[in-house]
Image: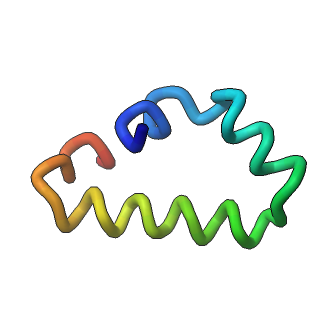
């Protein structure tokens, strides 16, 4: 799931988040994703 977010940010799931959630929530989730990626073995995917 996390890996596809970096390569395909316009997935249907993200469209739903944009429509139902606030932009702040979306930004917070993206920041959390990068933090997790940078602190895990998959950090290279986030770059």
Q: Is residue 43 above or below residue 26?
A: above
Q: Is residue 16 left or right of residue 44?
A: right
Q: Position of residue 15 (x, y in %)?
A: 77, 37
At horizontal 32% and vertical 48% (from top left) the residue drawn is 46
- Tell me where residue 36 sits by quadrant: bottom left
Q: Is residue 35 left or right of residue 16?
A: left
- Tell me where residue 11 sits by quadrant: top right
Q: Position of residue 7 (x, y in %)?
A: 45, 29
Q: Position of residue 41 (x, y in %)?
A: 10, 52
Count every numbered label the image shows and give the total: 0
Quadrant position of the N terminus in the picture? top left
Q: Is residue 10 left or right of residue 17?
A: left
Furthest toward the left, the residue is 41
At horizontal 64% and vertical 65% (from top left) the residue drawn is 27
Furthest toward the right, the residue is 19
* Towards the viewer: 5 or 47: 5
Q: Position of residue 47 (x, y in %)?
A: 30, 47
At horizontal 18% and vertical 47% (from top left) the residue drawn is 42
Q: Is residue 8 left or right of residue 32?
A: right
Display coloring: rainbow
């Amino acid at each position: 799931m996390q890996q596809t977010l970096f390569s395909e940010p316009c997935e249907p799931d993200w469209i739903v988040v944009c429509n139902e959630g606030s932009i702040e929530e979306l930004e917070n989730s993206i920041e959390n994703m990068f933090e997790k990626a940078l602190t895990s073995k998959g950090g290279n995917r986030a770059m």
